[in-house]
Image (tube, rainbow, N blue to C red):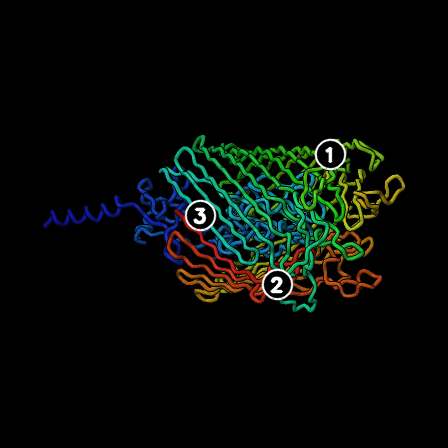
Amino acid sequence: MSRIIVFIFIWFTSIQFWGQTIQVVEVETDFPIDRVLVYNKNKSFYNYTDKNGKIDITTFDTDDIINFQHISFIDKSITKKEIYSLNNIVSLEKSSEQIEEVILSASRSKEKRARIAEHIEVITQHIIQEQSPQTSADLLALTPGVKVQKSQFGGGSPVLRGMESNRVLLVVDGVRLNNAIYRKGHLQNSITVSPNLLERTEVIFGPSSIIYGSDALGGVIHYYTKKPRLSENSLINSSLFTRYSSVNNEISASYTLEYSAEKWASLTAISTSKFGDLKMGTNHNHGFENWGLVPYYSNNTATYYNDTPLINSNTSLQKNTGYNQIDLLQKFLIPLSSNTNLSFNIQYSNSTDVPRFDKLNEYNDDESLRYAEWYYGPQKRFLVSSQLNFRPQYKLMEKGQITLAFQDINESRIERKYNDLDKFFRDENVKVWSLNGDFHVPLTPNNKRILSYGFETSYNDVTSKAIGQVLNVNGNQIDGFSDTFNIQSRFPDGGSSYTNFAIYTNYRFDHSKKGTLNIGARYTNTLLKAAWIDDSFITLPEMEVSLSNSAVSGTLSYIYKPNNNWRLSSILSSGFRSPNIDDIGKIREKRGNVSVPNTALKPEHAYNAEIGILHYINSKKIIIGFNTYYTLLHNYINRGIHSINDQDSLLYDGEWATTYANVNKGNAYIVGGTFSLISQLGKSFKLKSAATYTKGQAYDDDEALSSIPPFFGNLNLSYQLKKLNFGIDFKFNGRKKPQDYNLFEGIDNFEETPLIDSEASDLRDRYYGTPTWQTLNLLGQYKLNRYTNIYLHIDNVFDIHYKEFASGVSAPGRNISIAVNTQF
C-alpha cells in the first residue's frame, strides 16, 4: 500500500514539475497567440510562444514571476505556481480593450500612458487589420483628432490641431521623414509607408514633445513597422494579406516572412497595391447636383497625344486618379550580448506616375480644360538604418539607443497644357544622413525619477533640376522630342543643403501616487545654404544665401490623479520651426500666382497650453476624455504678396503671374479640443465616440488661418462574439462657411467647394464653402480558424457624395471591401 501511495505522489509531482509546457490564448476566443515574449524579472531568460501559443517554462523556478508581452495585448505578470492552478493556460486581453493601459513608445522608451500628459492616440496592429485601410493616409483618417486632405487619390496630408505639411513631423522607426523640401500646404508623403507593413502608429498632438523637436508644431506621427524577434528555438512564421475594394477596383497583397533564432532574426515583407480610378458618391444630398462631377477628362499619356478632352460617360467616375505602389521591408536583429543588440532596417517604396487630379480638372476662363498632362513622377523613398540598443547599467546611463540612417528620396512633377507641345519636367532629389542618440537612467531604484537625454543631427542635400521639351507629334503618336529649352527649377539650381543639430534632456518624477511632474528642454540649431545659378527667369537680391537659426524650446507638464476614477493633466510647452529649403527657395505656380524665394524669412514659434481630463466610471468600463488647448503662433509663416526687384509679376511657363512668397507675420492663435467616449456595454457591446473642434485666427489682421478643419467626429458601436466581430461606424463633418476660409493663401482650395454664383464679384459670395456631410459604414470580422481572419467592409453605405475639407478629389462612394489574412 505504501508503494502505491509513493507512486501516486511521484506521478502527480512529475505532472506539476516536469510537464511544464503552457499555452497562451486570447481571453475572448481561446485561440492561441504566437510570438508572445515570455521572460523573467532580469530578462536572463526569454523566449517566444510557437504557432500553437505554447512554450516550455522548465527554466523558471516555481516562485518566479513570469512576464508575458505582446504588441497587441495587455502585458501580464504571473507566478509559475499560479499558472499551474490555471491548468497551464495563460489568457491575455487585447490592448484595445483597455486603451488607458497601453504601453507607448512616445518618449522613445516604453512608458505607461498614465505617466504621459500629452494627448496621444495609438493605432495598434489589431486596429490596422480590423479597419483595413487602403493607404497610410486612410489609416490616419481613422484616428480621433486627425483630418486628412487629398488633392488627388495618391496622396493624403494629415492635419493635427489646425497644422499640416511641414508643421507636422512624420517619423518611421525613429527616423524623421520630414526633409528640407517638405512644403507648406499639402503633402502626399504620408502614403510612402504601406499600412500593411505597420505594427503600430502613434500620434502625439501638440508641440510639447522635446524628444522630436523642430517641425512638430502640430504634433508627431510615428510609424512603427513590423520587426523580427529572437527565440531560443528556430522558428519560421509567415502571413499573407489580400484585399479587394469595389470603389476603385483595388487589389492589394502583402506577404511577411519571419525567421527567429537565438543568435539572429530576420523579417522580410512586401506589399503591392493597384488602385483604379475612384468612384465618388452619387447621392448629392447637399443639394449641389453638379458639384465634383467630371464631365471631361484627358487621355494624354507619355506616348499618346490628343488635343481634345474626352467626354466622360460616367461623370461620377473620377478619371485619372488611379496608380500603383510597391513597398519592401527587410529587417535583421542580431544580439551582441545579453544587454546589447544591433538591428538593421531597409525600406523601399516606389509608385507609378500619380495623376494630380485637381490640376487635371482645372479650367481656363473659356471653360476649357487647362492641362493635358499633370502628374507626379514615381515617388521613390529608400531608407537604410542601423540601431544599437544597449543596457550598460552605468550610473548616468541605464539604457540607450543610437540610430544611424540614410534616406534617398526622389520626386518629380510633369505638366503640359492643352494645345501646347511644350512639356515641363521638374525633378528633385534629397539625400538625408542622420544620427540620433537617446539615453535613459532611473535616478531611484523604483523608477519614480527618470532622466532622459539625447541628441539628433541630420544633413539634407537637395538637388533640383528642370528642363522643357517640345513634343514631336505624328498624328496621335508622340515620337520623342524635337527640341529642348530652359525652364525655372523648383528649388535652387546651384544646389542647397539643410543641417540640423539638437540636444535635449527630460526629467520625469512621480512625487506621489497621485502626481507626476515632467520637465524638459531642447536646444536646436539649423544651417541652410542655397545657391541659384540661372538668372534668366528671376534675379534675386542674393544669389547665394547662408542662414543659421537656433532656439531653445521646453515643456512643463503635470498629471494629478485625485483617485482611481479621475486623471487630470496640464501642459505648458513651446515649439520652434526653422525655415527649410521649400520655405525660402521654392518657385512654383498655382492658379495664376507664382511663389518666389524670400531669403529674409525667419523661424516661427509656437507657445502652447493645454488641459486634459480622463474620467473612469463603473470600474473603467466607461472612459470619458476631454483635451483642450490654446496655441499662440509668433512670427508665423504665411503666404503674402512679395515683390522682387520692385516687380510684382513675372513670366512663368509662358504665362504672366503675380508673385507671392512665404513671409513672416505677427501673432495668431489656434484653439480647440477633442472629446472622446469609450464604453463597454455588457460583455459583447462596445461604444466609441470622438468629436474635434478647431478654430484659428490671426491677431494682426483678423484673417482666418489656413488648414483649420470644420467640426468633425465619429461614433462607433461594435459587437463581439467568440469568432465574429461586427461594427457600425457613423462619421460626421460640419460645415465650413466662406467667412471661415483664408482666401489669400489659397491652401484651403476654396474654389473646390460648390459654385453658387459665378457672376459674384466677391469670391466669398461665389462659392458655398464646405457642406456638412455624414456617412454610415459597416464592418465585420470572422475568425475562420486560429490562422485565418476574414474582413468585410461596406463603407459609405448610402453612397453619399462629399469632399474632405480642402480636398480636390471627391471622397469614395459606396465601397464593398473584402480582405483575408492568413498565417502559416
Q: Which residue is mark 3?
A: 240
* Viewer-side residue, 702 vs 515: 702
Q: Which residue is mark 2?
A: 281
Lateral position of residue 298 relative to residue 395, left or right:
right
**Residue 541 drawn at (x, y percent):** 85, 35
**Residue 724 drawn at (x, y percent):** 42, 61
Lateral position of residue 613 relative to residue 422, left or right:
left
Q: Are marks 3 and 1 in contact (CB under 8 Å)?
A: no
| Furthest residue in direction front, as rendered | 475
Q: Which residue is mark 1?
A: 528
Q: What amino acid is found at the position of numbered circle 3 in the picture?
A: Leu
Q: What amino acid is found at the position of numbered circle 1 in the picture?
A: Leu
Dot 1: element? strand
Lateral position of residue 320 relative to residue 685, left or right:
right
Residue 573 seen in render: no
Q: Is residue 344 above or below residue 193?
A: above
Q: Earlier in the sequence, mark 1 or mark 2?
A: 2
Q: Earlier in the sequence, mark 3 or mark 1?
A: 3
Q: Nearer the viewer, mark 2 or mark 3?
A: 2
Q: Residue at x 46, y 45 (%)?
A: 255
